[in-house]
Amino acid sequence: MASSRKKLLIIDGYNVLRSGSLYKPVSREHPDYTDDAFNTARERLINDVINYAGREWRAIIVFDGAHNAFSEGRPETIGGVQIVFSPAGQSADKVIEKLAHDARERGVETLVVTSDATIQDTVFGGGVDRMSAEGFSHEVGEYYESARLDETPQVAEKRTVAGRIPVETVEKLKALRDQMQGS
């Protein structure tokens, strides 16, 4: 029977972009968060979270907006995933820790995706599961591979009469045929 428990997936956005193998090449080449290539990587992460979370998880991606004087911390929803830039002066780490703590207090099964050791220790100490950015990259890769395999056309097994008859019976029939041909 399907679980009816609520599940929350919290992604440390910039940490995953810098640490997850699916996104690292772009973030290494384009360390400026305003660069078009980095924006493309951010969009890829959002799409990957939308696909990965599906109907099983409620997902929130938190990006650090602490050094952006215009960041108000208001969430935006894209494809069912909440995107949050932390408010000016507040780190994404604090937003993630608060979201995880509040969810745990409400009894919501929560998974935080980050490779930041401090966040991992803080949320795990509060009873929240965590996954590394690389672990998430691997899981997303596996998700896409299984989806690709599901769409691969399968060759239908050829069903013959001989395939439905027990092997012993086929052998007896062959022996009978050989006897009749020898006569």
Image (cartoon, grey):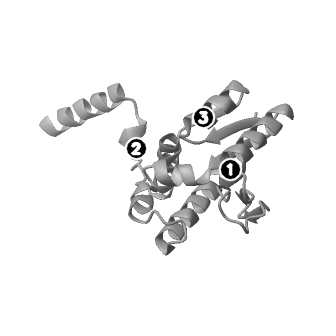
Amino acid found under the numbered disc labelled 1 = Ser
Contact check, label 1 and label 2, Cβ < 8 Å: no
Contact check, label 3 and label 1, Cβ < 8 Å: no
Amino acid found under the numbered disc labelled 3 = Thr
Q: How many angstroms separate mark 2 from mark 3 (CA)?
A: 65 Å
Residue extending farthest to the right is: 106
Question: Residue at horizontal 40%, vertical 54%?
Answer: 155
Which residue corresponds to mark 3? 118
Q: Does the image show residue 49?
A: yes
The picture quadrant where one finds residue 164 is: top left
Please tell me whether residue 148 is drawn above or below residue 113 in the rendered image. Answer: below
Amino acid found under the numbered disc labelled 2 = Val
Callout 2: 10 Å neighbours few (<14), some, many (20+)?
few
Residue 82, given in percent of the width and then of the height, sits at 74, 58
Please tell me whether residue 100 is drawn above or below residue 169 in the rendered image. Answer: below
- Name the disc covering residue 161, or none: 2
Q: Nearer the viewer, residue 47 or 4?
A: 47
Residue extending farthest to the left is: 182
Question: Residue at horizontal 61%, vertical 56%?
Answer: 51
Quadrant the N terminus occupies: top right
Report the side of 108 relative to 48 (left or right): right
For marks 1 and 2, the one nearer the N-term is: 1
Report the side of 182 relative to 140 (left or right): left
Which residue corresponds to mark 1? 91
Q: Secondary structure beneath disc 1?
A: loop
Q: Does the image show residue 56?
A: no
Residue 22, given in percent of the width and then of the height, sits at 45, 54
